[in-house]
Image (tube, rainbow, N blue to C red):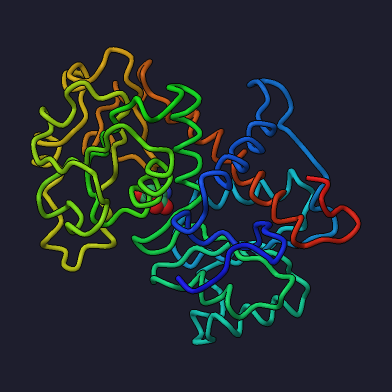
Amino acid sequence: MDVEQLNERGELRHLISLAELTRSHLELIIEHASRYLTPAGQPAPRDDILEGRTVANLFFEASTRTRASFELAAKRLRADVLNLDVNTSSRAKGESIMDTIFTLQAMQVDIFVVRDASTGVPARIAQQVAPHVCVLNAGESDVSHPTQGLLDLMTIQQRKGDVRNLAVAIVGDIKHSRVARSAYQALSKFGVGELRLIGPAELLPEDDEFRGAIRQTDLTAGLDGADVIMALRLQKERFAQLSDIPDPQEYYRRYGLTLERLELAKRDAIVMHPGPMNRGVEIESAVADGPQSVIQEQVTNGLAIRMAVLALIQRHLGGPRAGAA
Ligand code: ASP
Protein backbone atom coordinates (compact mmCIF):
# COMPACT_ATOMS: atom_id res chain seq x y z
CA MET A 1 0.00 0.00 0.00
CA ASP A 2 1.52 3.31 -1.00
CA VAL A 3 -0.48 5.72 1.05
CA GLU A 4 0.81 7.32 4.24
CA GLN A 5 -1.73 6.88 7.01
CA LEU A 6 -0.11 9.35 9.38
CA ASN A 7 0.31 13.08 8.84
CA GLU A 8 3.61 14.96 9.21
CA ARG A 9 3.02 15.23 12.97
CA GLY A 10 2.65 11.45 13.25
CA GLU A 11 -1.11 11.69 13.85
CA LEU A 12 -3.59 9.31 12.29
CA ARG A 13 -5.05 10.77 9.13
CA HIS A 14 -6.31 7.76 7.16
CA LEU A 15 -7.06 4.24 8.37
CA ILE A 16 -6.60 1.89 5.45
CA SER A 17 -4.74 -1.09 6.91
CA LEU A 18 -3.40 -2.16 10.29
CA ALA A 19 -0.32 -3.71 8.68
CA GLU A 20 1.66 -0.44 8.52
CA LEU A 21 0.65 0.86 11.94
CA THR A 22 2.72 0.19 15.04
CA ARG A 23 1.60 -1.53 18.19
CA SER A 24 1.47 1.81 19.99
CA HIS A 25 -0.94 3.24 17.40
CA LEU A 26 -3.25 0.30 18.01
CA GLU A 27 -2.90 0.73 21.78
CA LEU A 28 -3.75 4.42 21.47
CA ILE A 29 -6.94 3.67 19.52
CA ILE A 30 -8.05 0.91 21.91
CA GLU A 31 -7.26 3.01 24.98
CA HIS A 32 -9.24 5.86 23.47
CA ALA A 33 -12.14 3.50 22.61
CA SER A 34 -12.39 2.34 26.21
CA ARG A 35 -13.44 5.91 27.10
CA TYR A 36 -16.45 5.49 24.83
CA LEU A 37 -17.90 2.54 26.73
CA THR A 38 -20.69 3.07 29.23
CA PRO A 39 -22.60 0.38 31.16
CA ALA A 40 -25.63 -1.07 29.34
CA GLY A 41 -28.81 0.81 30.19
CA GLN A 42 -27.05 4.16 30.59
CA PRO A 43 -27.19 6.74 27.80
CA ALA A 44 -24.74 6.04 25.00
CA PRO A 45 -21.46 7.96 25.26
CA ARG A 46 -21.36 11.28 23.48
CA ASP A 47 -18.79 13.90 22.60
CA ASP A 48 -19.00 17.03 20.44
CA ILE A 49 -15.55 16.66 18.95
CA LEU A 50 -16.76 16.39 15.34
CA GLU A 51 -19.23 19.26 15.52
CA GLY A 52 -19.10 21.17 12.25
CA ARG A 53 -17.49 18.25 10.41
CA THR A 54 -19.12 16.09 7.77
CA VAL A 55 -18.73 12.33 7.43
CA ALA A 56 -19.86 10.53 4.26
CA ASN A 57 -20.50 6.80 4.43
CA LEU A 58 -19.91 5.33 0.99
CA PHE A 59 -20.79 1.66 1.09
CA PHE A 60 -20.40 0.20 -2.37
CA GLU A 61 -20.90 -3.27 -0.93
CA ALA A 62 -23.76 -4.44 1.29
CA SER A 63 -23.42 -3.84 5.01
CA THR A 64 -25.73 -3.57 7.96
CA ARG A 65 -23.75 -3.56 11.17
CA THR A 66 -20.59 -1.77 10.03
CA ARG A 67 -22.54 1.00 8.36
CA ALA A 68 -24.86 1.42 11.35
CA SER A 69 -21.83 1.41 13.63
CA PHE A 70 -19.97 4.12 11.68
CA GLU A 71 -23.14 6.19 11.37
CA LEU A 72 -23.87 6.09 15.10
CA ALA A 73 -20.21 6.71 15.92
CA ALA A 74 -20.14 9.88 13.80
CA LYS A 75 -23.51 11.10 15.11
CA ARG A 76 -22.49 10.53 18.73
CA LEU A 77 -19.51 12.79 18.02
CA ARG A 78 -21.94 15.37 16.56
CA ALA A 79 -20.79 15.18 12.94
CA ASP A 80 -23.16 15.76 10.05
CA VAL A 81 -23.54 12.34 8.43
CA LEU A 82 -24.33 11.56 4.83
CA ASN A 83 -25.17 7.98 3.84
CA LEU A 84 -24.93 7.35 0.14
CA ASP A 85 -27.41 4.79 -1.04
CA VAL A 86 -25.50 2.30 -3.10
CA ASN A 87 -28.43 1.39 -5.32
CA THR A 88 -29.15 4.91 -6.41
CA SER A 89 -25.58 6.20 -6.37
CA SER A 90 -24.09 7.64 -9.50
CA ARG A 91 -21.57 4.80 -9.61
CA ALA A 92 -24.47 2.70 -10.83
CA LYS A 93 -24.86 5.29 -13.59
CA GLY A 94 -21.22 4.95 -14.58
CA GLU A 95 -19.66 7.88 -12.72
CA SER A 96 -16.21 7.02 -11.48
CA ILE A 97 -15.69 6.73 -7.74
CA MET A 98 -13.28 9.65 -7.80
CA ASP A 99 -15.86 11.91 -9.48
CA THR A 100 -18.27 11.05 -6.66
CA ILE A 101 -15.55 11.75 -4.09
CA PHE A 102 -14.56 15.10 -5.63
CA THR A 103 -18.22 16.15 -5.80
CA LEU A 104 -18.70 15.37 -2.12
CA GLN A 105 -15.38 16.98 -1.24
CA ALA A 106 -16.65 20.15 -2.92
CA MET A 107 -19.62 19.92 -0.52
CA GLN A 108 -17.07 20.03 2.30
CA VAL A 109 -17.14 16.41 3.34
CA ASP A 110 -14.16 15.97 5.70
CA ILE A 111 -14.15 12.20 6.25
CA PHE A 112 -14.99 9.43 3.82
CA VAL A 113 -15.86 6.00 5.21
CA VAL A 114 -15.53 3.58 2.33
CA ARG A 115 -16.47 -0.04 1.77
CA ASP A 116 -15.76 -1.62 -1.59
CA ALA A 117 -15.58 -5.09 -3.11
CA SER A 118 -12.39 -4.29 -5.06
CA THR A 119 -8.87 -4.22 -3.67
CA GLY A 120 -7.15 -0.85 -3.43
CA VAL A 121 -10.15 1.50 -3.59
CA PRO A 122 -9.79 3.11 -0.11
CA ALA A 123 -6.05 3.71 -0.70
CA ARG A 124 -6.69 5.15 -4.15
CA ILE A 125 -9.21 7.58 -2.71
CA ALA A 126 -6.82 8.51 0.12
CA GLN A 127 -4.08 9.32 -2.41
CA GLN A 128 -6.28 11.74 -4.30
CA VAL A 129 -8.34 13.66 -1.74
CA ALA A 130 -7.47 17.17 -0.56
CA PRO A 131 -4.79 17.41 2.17
CA HIS A 132 -7.24 17.99 5.03
CA VAL A 133 -9.58 15.13 4.06
CA CYS A 134 -9.44 11.70 5.75
CA VAL A 135 -10.39 8.23 4.51
CA LEU A 136 -11.41 5.27 6.65
CA ASN A 137 -11.54 1.76 5.26
CA ALA A 138 -14.79 0.07 6.31
CA GLY A 139 -14.06 -3.21 4.52
CA GLU A 140 -12.00 -3.76 1.38
CA SER A 141 -12.51 -6.89 -0.69
CA ASP A 142 -10.90 -9.84 1.13
CA VAL A 143 -7.91 -7.69 2.07
CA SER A 144 -8.52 -5.38 4.99
CA HIS A 145 -11.11 -4.39 7.61
CA PRO A 146 -9.04 -2.42 10.13
CA THR A 147 -11.77 -1.34 12.57
CA GLN A 148 -12.90 -4.97 12.77
CA GLY A 149 -9.33 -6.07 13.58
CA LEU A 150 -9.17 -3.42 16.30
CA LEU A 151 -12.51 -4.35 17.85
CA ASP A 152 -11.55 -8.02 17.82
CA LEU A 153 -8.23 -7.29 19.54
CA MET A 154 -9.97 -5.06 22.08
CA THR A 155 -12.56 -7.76 22.88
CA ILE A 156 -9.89 -10.44 23.31
CA GLN A 157 -7.77 -8.21 25.55
CA GLN A 158 -10.79 -7.24 27.66
CA ARG A 159 -11.71 -10.85 28.30
CA LYS A 160 -8.34 -12.56 28.26
CA GLY A 161 -5.63 -9.99 28.87
CA ASP A 162 -2.20 -10.46 27.30
CA VAL A 163 -2.56 -12.21 23.94
CA ARG A 164 0.96 -13.67 24.23
CA ASN A 165 -0.49 -16.38 26.47
CA LEU A 166 -3.33 -17.30 24.16
CA ALA A 167 -4.14 -19.87 21.49
CA VAL A 168 -6.51 -18.18 19.03
CA ALA A 169 -8.36 -20.40 16.55
CA ILE A 170 -9.97 -18.85 13.47
CA VAL A 171 -12.37 -21.32 11.87
CA GLY A 172 -13.91 -21.19 8.42
CA ASP A 173 -13.48 -19.38 5.14
CA ILE A 174 -10.18 -17.69 5.91
CA LYS A 175 -9.13 -17.45 2.28
CA HIS A 176 -11.84 -14.89 1.48
CA SER A 177 -11.81 -13.12 4.85
CA ARG A 178 -10.66 -9.55 5.41
CA VAL A 179 -11.71 -10.05 9.03
CA ALA A 180 -9.14 -12.83 9.47
CA ARG A 181 -6.42 -10.78 7.74
CA SER A 182 -6.97 -7.73 9.92
CA ALA A 183 -7.22 -9.92 13.06
CA TYR A 184 -3.90 -11.51 12.13
CA GLN A 185 -2.27 -8.11 11.64
CA ALA A 186 -3.53 -6.89 15.00
CA LEU A 187 -2.77 -10.06 16.98
CA SER A 188 0.69 -10.58 15.54
CA LYS A 189 1.75 -7.06 16.55
CA PHE A 190 0.95 -8.03 20.12
CA GLY A 191 2.81 -11.35 19.89
CA VAL A 192 -0.17 -13.73 19.98
CA GLY A 193 0.88 -17.06 21.54
CA GLU A 194 -0.51 -19.28 18.83
CA LEU A 195 -2.70 -18.53 15.85
CA ARG A 196 -4.48 -21.50 14.30
CA LEU A 197 -6.25 -21.29 10.96
CA ILE A 198 -8.80 -24.08 10.63
CA GLY A 199 -10.91 -24.93 7.62
CA PRO A 200 -11.14 -27.07 4.50
CA ALA A 201 -7.85 -26.96 2.55
CA GLU A 202 -9.45 -24.99 -0.28
CA LEU A 203 -10.54 -22.23 2.15
CA LEU A 204 -7.18 -21.80 3.86
CA PRO A 205 -4.99 -18.89 2.69
CA GLU A 206 -1.86 -19.18 0.56
CA ASP A 207 1.33 -20.30 2.32
CA ASP A 208 3.00 -16.89 2.03
CA GLU A 209 0.25 -15.23 4.09
CA PHE A 210 -0.35 -15.36 7.86
CA ARG A 211 3.31 -16.07 8.65
CA GLY A 212 3.80 -18.12 11.79
CA ALA A 213 0.18 -19.34 11.92
CA ILE A 214 -0.61 -23.05 12.17
CA ARG A 215 -2.87 -24.41 9.41
CA GLN A 216 -5.23 -27.19 10.29
CA THR A 217 -7.95 -28.98 8.31
CA ASP A 218 -9.07 -31.06 11.29
CA LEU A 219 -11.42 -29.06 13.51
CA THR A 220 -11.06 -31.40 16.49
CA ALA A 221 -7.30 -30.96 16.63
CA GLY A 222 -7.59 -27.25 15.88
CA LEU A 223 -9.94 -26.50 18.77
CA ASP A 224 -7.99 -28.50 21.31
CA GLY A 225 -7.14 -26.23 24.26
CA ALA A 226 -7.98 -23.01 22.38
CA ASP A 227 -8.60 -19.82 24.42
CA VAL A 228 -10.37 -17.88 21.70
CA ILE A 229 -12.43 -19.22 18.80
CA MET A 230 -13.44 -16.95 15.96
CA ALA A 231 -16.02 -18.45 13.59
CA LEU A 232 -16.27 -17.03 10.09
CA ARG A 233 -19.03 -17.03 7.51
CA LEU A 234 -18.61 -18.66 4.10
CA GLN A 235 -18.10 -15.50 2.02
CA LYS A 236 -20.26 -16.70 -0.83
CA GLU A 237 -19.95 -13.44 -2.76
CA ARG A 238 -16.18 -13.91 -3.05
CA PHE A 239 -16.01 -17.41 -4.50
CA ALA A 240 -14.80 -17.48 -8.11
CA GLN A 241 -17.56 -19.91 -9.09
CA LEU A 242 -20.87 -20.77 -7.43
CA SER A 243 -19.99 -24.45 -7.73
CA ASP A 244 -16.97 -23.88 -5.43
CA ILE A 245 -19.18 -22.91 -2.48
CA PRO A 246 -19.32 -25.81 0.00
CA ASP A 247 -22.69 -27.43 0.67
CA PRO A 248 -23.93 -25.78 3.92
CA GLN A 249 -25.06 -29.03 5.59
CA GLU A 250 -21.84 -30.85 4.78
CA TYR A 251 -19.86 -27.83 5.95
CA TYR A 252 -21.76 -27.74 9.26
CA ARG A 253 -21.11 -31.46 9.74
CA ARG A 254 -17.36 -30.95 9.34
CA TYR A 255 -16.70 -27.42 10.56
CA GLY A 256 -19.80 -26.14 12.40
CA LEU A 257 -18.99 -24.81 15.88
CA THR A 258 -21.36 -26.89 18.03
CA LEU A 259 -21.66 -27.11 21.81
CA GLU A 260 -20.10 -30.53 21.66
CA ARG A 261 -17.06 -29.27 19.77
CA LEU A 262 -16.73 -26.21 21.98
CA GLU A 263 -15.90 -28.60 24.82
CA LEU A 264 -12.60 -29.36 23.09
CA ALA A 265 -11.44 -25.81 23.78
CA LYS A 266 -10.51 -24.47 27.22
CA ARG A 267 -13.44 -24.34 29.65
CA ASP A 268 -13.31 -20.54 29.68
CA ALA A 269 -12.73 -20.10 25.96
CA ILE A 270 -14.56 -17.22 24.33
CA VAL A 271 -16.47 -17.45 21.05
CA MET A 272 -16.39 -14.62 18.52
CA HIS A 273 -18.07 -13.97 15.17
CA PRO A 274 -17.87 -10.77 13.08
CA GLY A 275 -21.43 -11.17 11.77
CA PRO A 276 -23.52 -11.67 9.84
CA MET A 277 -23.94 -15.19 11.25
CA ASN A 278 -25.32 -18.14 9.43
CA ARG A 279 -26.71 -20.21 12.27
CA GLY A 280 -26.58 -23.90 11.52
CA VAL A 281 -23.78 -23.42 8.96
CA GLU A 282 -20.64 -22.13 10.74
CA ILE A 283 -22.11 -21.91 14.25
CA GLU A 284 -24.83 -23.59 16.32
CA SER A 285 -27.37 -21.20 17.85
CA ALA A 286 -26.70 -22.57 21.34
CA VAL A 287 -23.05 -21.51 20.95
CA ALA A 288 -23.80 -18.11 19.39
CA ASP A 289 -26.22 -17.27 22.21
CA GLY A 290 -24.41 -19.20 24.95
CA PRO A 291 -22.43 -17.99 27.96
CA GLN A 292 -19.07 -18.18 26.18
CA SER A 293 -20.19 -15.97 23.30
CA VAL A 294 -18.79 -12.42 23.22
CA ILE A 295 -20.44 -11.58 19.92
CA GLN A 296 -22.56 -8.73 21.34
CA GLU A 297 -19.49 -7.32 23.11
CA GLN A 298 -17.75 -7.22 19.75
CA VAL A 299 -20.58 -5.07 18.41
CA THR A 300 -20.43 -2.68 21.38
CA ASN A 301 -16.65 -2.43 21.15
CA GLY A 302 -16.92 -1.86 17.41
CA LEU A 303 -18.87 1.34 17.93
CA ALA A 304 -16.39 2.54 20.56
CA ILE A 305 -13.47 1.78 18.22
CA ARG A 306 -15.09 3.74 15.39
CA MET A 307 -15.75 6.68 17.70
CA ALA A 308 -12.11 6.54 18.81
CA VAL A 309 -10.76 6.47 15.25
CA LEU A 310 -12.99 9.40 14.25
CA ALA A 311 -11.98 11.34 17.35
CA LEU A 312 -8.28 10.73 16.72
CA ILE A 313 -8.39 11.82 13.10
CA GLN A 314 -10.06 15.03 14.27
CA ARG A 315 -6.53 15.97 15.39
CA HIS A 316 -5.51 15.93 11.74
CA LEU A 317 -8.56 17.90 10.67
CA GLY A 318 -7.48 20.60 13.08
CA GLY A 319 -9.52 23.72 13.73
CA PRO A 320 -10.47 25.14 17.08
CA ARG A 321 -10.89 21.76 18.70
CA ALA A 322 -7.65 20.23 17.42
CA GLY A 323 -5.89 18.12 19.99
CA ALA A 324 -8.93 18.02 22.24
CA ALA A 325 -9.47 14.31 21.65
N1 ASP B 1 -19.05 -8.16 8.38
C1 ASP B 1 -17.78 -8.74 8.06
C2 ASP B 1 -17.17 -8.07 6.87
O1 ASP B 1 -17.60 -7.04 6.47
C3 ASP B 1 -17.81 -10.20 7.93
C4 ASP B 1 -18.69 -10.77 6.88
O2 ASP B 1 -19.27 -10.06 6.07
O3 ASP B 1 -18.77 -12.00 6.85
O4 ASP B 1 -16.21 -8.55 6.31
Residue 219's spot in the image, x, y percent? 13, 33
Quadrant (top left/top right/bottom left/bottom right) for the C terminus: top right
* Left-right relation of 255 to 81: left
Give the residue at x 37% y 43%.
Answer: 188
User: Could you say which is closer to the camera, residue 19 or residue 286?
Assistant: 19
Give the residue at x 87% y 61%.
Answer: 319
* Residue ranking furthest to the top: 267
User: Could you say which is closer to the camera, residue 282 or residue 311?
Assistant: 311
* Left-right relation of 132 to 263: right
Q: Is residue 227 above or below residue 89?
A: above
Residue 324's spot in the image, x, y percent? 83, 46
Give the residue at x 45% y 67%.
Answer: 116
* Left-right relation of 282 to 17: left
User: Could you say which is closer to the camera, residue 295 or residue 250?
Assistant: 295
Q: Quadrant of residue 14?
A: bottom right
User: Could you say which is closer to the camera, residue 230 or residue 195?
Assistant: 195
